[in-house]
Image (cartoon, grey):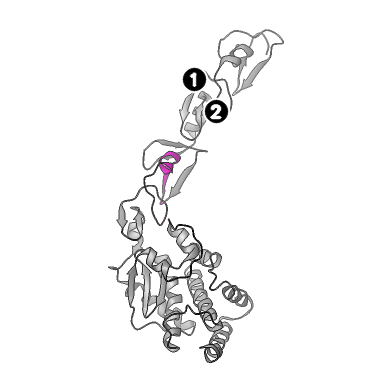
């Protein structure tokens, strides 16, 4: 630092040859640098540090930069969220790290850090998810009817009756093979190990609340499960023979291909990634076969093999 350059802090000119600190277009003499508090973001020896959410105490230069680049205000506390800070983004709104971390409850479906509705046996959900959820009072028949031609294209009929039974989370878990011992806190965790909709003993057992993007694909697969059970006089597809394994794998495939056809990316990727032990050996086979076989060939193979297995193992 030359003698004609003033220190940003004390204003005095530095002695020739004396060490100095340079950043943000200014210089600070060694004496001032030693006694000044440093910015948590850039380590600049600040005149006045200010605490910023997600950064700690920062200098006047970093304050200016952050104020020019923000995520906007937090949806909950209304404080400004600055670029670089952790943020929850969903439903077209942003929530700051502090509000998310200190939330008293989170939405079962999307983890939004504020809930407005509680359903016994399921959990709580937020104002954004509430309008998207299908439940016992919804006209489910009207929602599912458009699947009829799709099921027909795979050689399956549409059920004449839709015996839905809306049940609590723990009850629908209980009728399915246990995949892990961890607690199911959110819908994403639930779908990693269990299905929110299962055909069982003459009924479609379904989670008390479910989003349409999950209802349609899962119903497609379980409508096939109903047809196979009725055809073979079975109460469910939870057996251990090759017939049951192939049937479950085919139902999972129908759900997957339904979601993919409808372009429900979140759902079909989840169905492809989270394959239960009950179909882990069969579903990948259908994925591989679909790469080099026409749908009609896949359908013929499945129907013929199921008939063969039914005679041999049921």
Q: Secondary structure at mark 2?
A: loop
List x then y, in percent, for residue 27: 61, 17
Q: Which residues are magenta?
A: 91-110
Q: Quadrant of the N terminus?
A: top right
List x then y, in percent, for residue 45: 57, 20
Q: Secondary structure at mark 1?
A: loop
Residue 94 colored magenta? Answer: yes
Q: Is residue 18 above or below residue 283?
A: above
List x then y, in percent, for residue 150: 45, 79
Residue under the point 52% across and 89% down: 310
Question: Which residue sits furthest left?
Answer: 137
Q: Is residue 112 above or below residue 33?
A: below
Viewer can see residue 171: yes
Q: Nearer the viewer, residue 203 or 288?
A: 203
Can you identify the residue that label 2 sits on? Answer: 40
In three-dimensional space, the C-alpha distance between marks 1 and 2, rounded to whole angstroms, equals 12 Å
Dot placed on the residue nearer the N-terminal end, 1 or 2: 2
Question: Which residue sits furthest front?
Answer: 181
Viewer can see residue 8: no
Q: Are marks 1 and 2 in contact (CB under 8 Å)?
A: no
Q: Is residue 177 above or below residue 28?
A: below
In the image: residue 301, left or right of residue 192: right
List x then y, in percent, for residue 274: 53, 65
Q: Nearer the viewer, mark 1 or mark 2?
A: 2
Can you identify the residue that label 1 sits on? Answer: 48
Residue 56 colored magenta? Answer: no
Label 1: few (<14), some or many (≥20) within 10 Å?
A: few
Q: Which mark is residue 74?
A: none
């Amino acid at each position: 630092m030359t003698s004609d350059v003033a220190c940003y802090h004390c204003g005095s000119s530095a002695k020739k040859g004396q060490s100095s600190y340079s950043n943000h277009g200014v210089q600070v003499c060694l004496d001032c640098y030693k006694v000044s508090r440093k910015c948590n973001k850039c380590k600049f020896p600040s005149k006045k540090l200010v605490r910023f959410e997600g950064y700690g105490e920062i200098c006047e230069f970093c304050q200016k930069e952050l104020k020019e680049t923000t995520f906007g205000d937090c949806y909950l506390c209304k404080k400004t969220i600055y670029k670089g800070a952790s943020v929850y983004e969903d439903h077209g709104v942003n929530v700051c790290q502090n509000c998310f971390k200190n939330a008293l409850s989170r939405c079962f479906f999307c983890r939004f850090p504020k809930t407005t509705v509680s359903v016994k046996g399921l959990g709580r959900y937020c104002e954004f998810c509430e309008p998207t959820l299908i439940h016992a009072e919804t006209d489910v028949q009207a929602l599912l009817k458009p699947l009829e031609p799709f099921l027909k294209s795979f050689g399956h009929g549409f059920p004449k009756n839709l015996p839905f039974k809306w049940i609590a989370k723990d009850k629908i878990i209980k009728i399915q093979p246990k995949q892990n011992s961890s607690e199911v806190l959110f819908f994403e965790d639930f779908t990693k190990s269990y299905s929110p909709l299962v055909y069982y003993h003459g009924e479609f057992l379904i989670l008390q609340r479910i989003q349409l993007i999950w209802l349609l694909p899962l119903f497609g697969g379980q409508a096939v499960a109903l047809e196979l059970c009725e055809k073979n006089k079975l109460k469910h597809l939870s057996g251990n023979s090759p017939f049951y394994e192939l049937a479950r794998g085919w139902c999972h495939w129908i759900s997957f291909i339904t979601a993919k056809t409808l372009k429900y990316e979140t759902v079909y990727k989840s169905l492809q990634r989270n394959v239960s032990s009950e179909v882990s050996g069969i579903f990948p086979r259908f994925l591989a076969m679909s790469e080099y076989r026409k749908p009609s060939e896949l359908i013929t193979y499945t129907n013929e093999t199921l008939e063969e297995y039914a005679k041999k193992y049921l």
